Each structure stands twice: as C-alpha cells, then as structure tokens.
Image: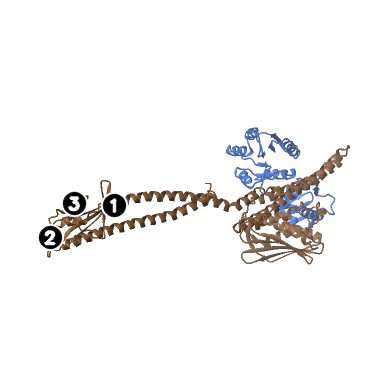
C-alpha cells in the first residue's frame, strides 16, 4: 500500500485537530446557553409559583378560597406563555389559567418539586413545567396540588437556529484550517523538496557531488549527512568497480596480445613440428593463466553477491596451518625460508574456503620473504569469541600508502612485477571476501622489517550478508 | 570404451572428439539435446559428456530422462555457469561430476578416466611396479633397481598417484587436490618443486627417466618416451 503524502498527512492532522477543538468549544457553548435558558425558565416559574403561594396563604376561610380564582387570574395577566393549574381535593380541576395547555396527567403525577421541571410537547409546542403541593391559609386543610407550565417553544426555535449557525460556521472554519494547514505544510516541507530535487540530479558520473549541510533545517541535517555519506560509499564502490573493469581489460590485454603476436609470428613461415609444439605449449600456459583469472574473478563476483556457501564445521586452525605448511614445505626449503606456527584455536567455518583464505596469505608471504627469512603464523584467541590468524613475514616494509589497498583486486605494490607466477593479484582480495563472508575482518601492517597480514574471525560464523 | 559427447558448441565438440579419440576412446557426438537423449537411450555408452545449455532439450532434462529410464552410465556435466545451486541440482539429478568452462582438456581427460575406473577392480595389489620401480603400499617403501629410495609421506603419495595413473597426464590442480587436499587454485610452482624433488630421487642416476613434464599440462609417469 502506498503511504499518503506528508502534506496530506499534515493537512489531515491539522484539520482534525482544529475540528476537535471547535467541536468541544461548540458543545460547551450550546450547553451553556441551554443551561441559561433553563435557569431563566425556572426563575420565571418560581416567580409565579411564589405569587400563587402568597395568594393561597391569604385565603384563611373557605369563602376566601372560593373567591381566589378571580385574584389568581388577575395575578397572571400578561403572562401569556405561562399556565397555572390547581387541582381540587377530589383531583378535579379547581382552577386553570387562560392557557389550558396543561394536561391533566401533570396533576396526577407525583409532585416533581420546584427544581425538577419536566418537559413535554403537545402539538407543535414544547412545554416545561413543575408540580408542587402548596398549603392554603385555612388551618388543617390539606395542601393543594399546583402545576405551572411554561411554553418554551421560542427557546427551542432559537436553539435550533443557533445550532445550525454554529455547526455551519464550524464546518467552514475546519475547511479554512485544512486549507491553511495544507499551505503551511507545503511551505514547511519546501526544504525537503529541495533535497529531493538535488538527489534527483545524482547520476553515476556525478557522484562527487555533495549537498550543503548548513543550508537545510536542523531536522534534515541528519538526512543530508547520511545521504552524503551514502554518496561517499557509492562513489568509492563505483570507483572500485570501474577500476576493476579497466583492470580486467588490462589484465586480459597482455596475454591476448602475447598470444596474437606469437601465433602471427609462428604462422609467418613454415616451421618444424618442434617449433609449433613450443608455440602451442606457450599458448597453453597463457590460457591456463587466463582461465585461473576468470575463475578467481567469478569467485569474487559470487562473494560480492553473497553466494559463497558456508558449510560450517569445526576447524582446528593449527592443524590446518600444519597441512598448508606440508604443501609449502618443499618450496620454502628451496627458497631458504623458515616456516613456524604458534598458538592454536578451533572455530566453526567453511573448511575449503577458509583454507583457501589462509593459503593465499601464506603464498603471498612466501613470495615476499627473502632467503634466510621466516614466515610465521600466529593463532590467538581473543575475547568475545574472536580468533585471530596472523601471517607475518620478514622482508622489506611495504610503504604505508599501499597498505589500505593491498586487499583490493589486482592491486600490486610494484606494477612492474605483475607478470610472474604469482597470478593476477586477486589472492588477497579473495582472502578478504572469504573472511568477510564468515563475518570477520582483515588488516595489514608493515614496519621494522616485518609485514603482518591478519584476519579476525568469529568462532561461529555470523552471516555477513 | 565408448563415449558420447552432447555439446552444441561446434569447436568445443570437435576438439573434445579429437582429444578423446586420440586418448583411445570411441566417440559419438551430437549438438542437439533430443538427439543426445535418443543416442544415450539406445546406444551402449560407457560415459556421457553432457553440456547443460543445449538446443531442443537442456542437459538437465536429458540427464533426468536418462536416470528415469534406468540408464546409469556415468554422466559428466559441462557448464559455463558456476553456481552452487546448479552444481547441487546436477548432482541431485544424478550427474557424477561437474566441470566448469573454461577447463583444460587434461583435466577433463583425468576426470573421465576416474569416472570410468570408479567401481571397477577395487582390490589393489600391495605392490605396484613400473619398469624397475617398485612401491610397497603397505610398508610405504619404494625401491628402484633394487635400491631403496627414501621418500617423505607426501612424496610417496605423489609417486603412488603418478603410478596409478601411469601414462596419463595429470594436471597440477589434480595433483594438488589429491596429494595435499588443496581443492582450489594454488601456487603451481609448489607442485613443480615437489615433482622436481621426487624426480631427483626416482630418476637421477638411472638411464630411463620415468617422470616427464607435459609442458603447460602437467606431469606423467611412463616407461617409454612417446616422441
């Protein structure tokens, strides 16, 4: 699912936040007004009720009571929206003011008390009323049930209009807020769009470009610096890759040009079978070298794609080194180089590729050791489940500027030495790939007549890919 | 021994045919997968060399239908692609070996001979003889013309390998893998030094030289000079 845009997200959030606030405010406001109306109604009802109570108390005899309706009517003149009804002892209607909207039911219901009005509607009109018991002035007489009702239809009509206005205004306000939110979000996100347009201009040939970290808001500096760092890494890999392709072309040019020249010359005139055989043998050696190079490059390509299979099994490193020494012993003796191993350790890893990794380091060390020198392998257990295998040889120091690139493909300290038996200069790169596939790392240092290539490997391979 | 080559690349096919014929095999060949399957089903071949990428029907399918039909002659797969899962797939489908291009012909020849020898005459005599050279496998001793020769363990293993394959050119990579268990490209000059030392012990001071260098290809132990 495609995630919604930041602008839309911000606009939506802004609009819903303001809608929430406005809704709350509107609810409080309408509730306050309703409460005000209720208060007003209650006061009006209480005022009339007080007048009725006074008049009832003045009637101290039955005769005076009988004359009371006239006085009540007088007292109620001018209150057209108010109706008063008083029930007689037998429950019949003893007095009713002009508005006879009061249903008889109100009188039969238990008294509501002065503060608890009930509301009902009758026809198109809405009423609010209370029922109370009021004593008369006649001693010993039971109190009369008095009901007062108020026509509150105008209030209701007002509230309906008010609510419509309120919600209409609120809807408009929310719309305006959303629009403003959209404008604010868009302008707020402007620096982000600038970053995007800069990123859009990055191409393979323009990887040197960097973005200005000081020109963006604080929230984006992390993004920009991370992006710049990514550009840096890409530039580095890209450079290595293009170096690698040009190196491949270069490495192939020499043997192919040898083969062409040699074949051309051989075919130039008739020769003896012996001479032809010599040419073919020489070609075969070139082909073999190229085939090896292709195999090595394919191995590296597989490593780059995380396709080196690691069949983890326990490996006794000292034993592995001894077996490799067994292989190199004759050559080392011929070259007058001593081989030595110290320490031991066991780790889990792929036997075939790890042997190859150590082999390449050994082979490299042997090639650069002068007669009378020593190649020594040190196996050391470190903390946190790391084992180090260091291959050290005596001999000339490698100038420090070459050290960081020694594990690069085809890299040679001395370019003029490129065509001897040592292969194409991929050995240490292969070591590095294998070690990294096991989750380890490689380092090299060279000083005081000793060069040391070292690999650090986890005791159990961690999947580096 | 009768071999079948199924390979669509014309040059590869004709050179394989020539090389294998000259090595003493009877060779049939085709460049098409369907033809290849038909020939392999009907002909009586001791071994099939099968390319993976073929027109008509690919090498996997040919191999699969051969095995389903119960034809169990050794099959050596050739491919230009080296992927671990392809290798596994080939072996699961019943291939006996797997060779990635580019390969040396001597490598192919050595593998073909190994496959053909597999499962046959497993009982080995304790003593192997070539001309006046004699090695005792049980006591790990070598004697030439009655004279005892002192060999290291690896030198003995190398000599044994050469004698077992006498007359065959052994590529350096095969020697490195069989004697030192170095199953990857390693320093070739190590093998050179080792063979030179062995030769110094075996051949120096004798009229007939047994170990010969096949330039650019490997080493061979033989009694007669082929030239």
Q: Nearer the viewer, mark 1 or mark 2?
A: 2
Q: Nearer the viewer, mark 3 or mark 1?
A: 1
> Could you say which quadrant of the image residue A143 lies in?
bottom left
Chain depicted in brown? A
Task: Say whether disc 1 or disc 2 marks the residue closer to the N-terminus.
Answer: 2
- Residue that badge 1 annotates: A152
Mark 2 chain: A
Q: CA distance from mark 1 to mark 2?
A: 33 Å
* A282 on left or right of A154: right
Q: Residue A345 location, x and y as percent?
A: 65, 64
Mark 3 chain: A
Q: Quadrant of the C terminus of chain A?
A: bottom right
Q: Are marks 3 and 1 in contact (CB under 8 Å)?
A: no
Q: CA distance from mark 3 to mark 1?
A: 19 Å
Element at badge 3?
helix
Mark 1 chain: A
Figure colour scheme: by chain
Chain depicted in blue? B
Q: Residue A361 location, x and y as percent?
A: 73, 58
Q: Are marks 2 and 3 in contact (CB under 8 Å)?
A: no
Q: Residue A121 location, x and y as percent?
A: 26, 49
Depth check: give the residue in front, A119 or B45.
A119
Asked if residue A326 can be seen in this view, the reply is no
- Residue that badge 2 annotates: A64
Task: Say whether disc 2 or disc 3 marks the residue closer to the N-terminus.
Answer: 2
Q: Residues within 10 Å of mark 1 (few under 14, many from 20)?
A: many
Element at badge 1?
loop
């Amino acid at each position: 699912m495609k995630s919604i845009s930041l602008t839309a997200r911000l606009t939506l959030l802004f609009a819903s936040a303001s809608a929430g606030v406005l809704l709350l405010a509107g609810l409080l406001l309408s509730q306050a007004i309703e409460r005000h109306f209720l208060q007003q109604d209650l006061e009006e009802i209480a005022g009339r009720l007080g007048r009725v109570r006074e008049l009832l108390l003045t009637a101290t005899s039955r005769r005076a009571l009988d004359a009371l309706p006239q006085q009540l009517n007088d007292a109620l003149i001018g209150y057209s929206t108010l109706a008063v009804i008083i029930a007689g002892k037998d429950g019949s209607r003893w007095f009713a003011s002009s508005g006879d909207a009061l249903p008889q039911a109100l009188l039969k219901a238990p008294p509501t008390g002065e503060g608890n009005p009930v509301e009902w509607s009758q026809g198109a009109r809405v009423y609010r009323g209370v029922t109370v018991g009021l004593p008369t002035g006649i001693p010993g007489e039971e109190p009369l049930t008095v009901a007062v009702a108020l026509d509150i239809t105008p209030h209701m009509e007002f509230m309906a209009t008010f609510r419509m206005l309120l919600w209409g205004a609120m809807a408009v306000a929310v719309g305006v807020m959303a629009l403003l939110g959209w404008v604010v979000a868009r302008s707020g996100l402007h620096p982000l769009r600038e970053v995007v347009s800069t990123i859009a201009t990055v191409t393979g040939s323009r990887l040197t470009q960097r973005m200005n970290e000081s020109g963006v808001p604080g929230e984006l500096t992390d993004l920009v610096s991370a992006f710049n760092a990514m550009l840096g890494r890409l530039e580095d890999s890209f450079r290595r890759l293009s170096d690698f392709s040009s190196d491949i072309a270069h490495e192939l040019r020499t043997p192919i040009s040898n083969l062409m020249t040699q074949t051309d010359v051989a075919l130039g005139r008739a020769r003896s079978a012996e001479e032809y055989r010599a040419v073919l043998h020489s070609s075969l050696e070139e082909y073999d070298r190229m085939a090896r190079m292709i195999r090595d490059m394919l191995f590296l390509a597989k490593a780059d794609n995380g396709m080196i299979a690691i069949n983890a099994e326990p490996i006794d490193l000292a034993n592995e080194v001894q077996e490799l020494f067994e292989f190199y012993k004759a050559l080392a003796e011929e070259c007058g180089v001593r081989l030595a191993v110290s320490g031991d350790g066991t780790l889990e890893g792929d036997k075939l590729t790890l042997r190859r990794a150590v082999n390449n380091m050994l082979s490299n060390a042997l090639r650069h050791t002068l007669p009378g020198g020593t190649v020594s392998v040190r196996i050391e257990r470190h903390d946190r489940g790391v084992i180090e295998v260091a291959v050290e040889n005596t001999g000339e120091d490698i100038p420090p500027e070459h050290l960081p690139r020694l594990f690069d493909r085809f890299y040679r300290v001395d370019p003029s030495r490129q065509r001897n038996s040592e292969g194409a200069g991929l050995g240490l790169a292969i070591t590095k790939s294998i070690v990294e596939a096991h989750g380890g790392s490689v380092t090299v240092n060279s000083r005081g007549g000793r060069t040391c290539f070292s690999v650090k490997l986890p005791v159990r391979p961690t999947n580096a890919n | 021994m009768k071999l079948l080559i199924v390979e669509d690349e014309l040059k590869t096919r004709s050179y394989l045919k020539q090389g294998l014929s000259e090595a003493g095999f009877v060779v049939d060949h085709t460049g098409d997968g369907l033809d290849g399957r038909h020939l392999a089903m009907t002909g009586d071949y001791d071994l099939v060399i099968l390319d993976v990428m073929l027109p008509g029907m690919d090498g996997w399918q040919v191999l699969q239908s051969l095995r389903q039909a119960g034809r169990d002659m050794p099959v050596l797969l050739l491919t230009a692609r080296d992927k671990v899962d392809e290798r596994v797939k080939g072996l699961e489908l019943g291939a006996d070996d797997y060779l990635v291009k580019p390969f040396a012909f001597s490598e192919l020849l050595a593998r073909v001979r190994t496959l053909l020898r597999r499962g046959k005459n497993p009982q080995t005599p304790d003593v192997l003889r070539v001309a006046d050279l004699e090695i005792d496998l049980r006591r790990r001793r070598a004697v030439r013309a009655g004279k005892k020769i002192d060999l290291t363990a690896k030198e003995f293993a190398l000599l044994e390998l050469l004698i077992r394959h006498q007359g065959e050119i052994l590529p350096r990579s095969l020697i490195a893998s069989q004697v030192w268990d170095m199953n990857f490209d390693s320093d070739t000059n190590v093998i050179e030094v080792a063979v030179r030392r062995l030769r110094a012990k075996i051949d120096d001071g004798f009229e007939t030289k047994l170990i010969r260098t096949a330039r650019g290809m490997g080493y061979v132990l033989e009694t007669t000079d082929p030239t």
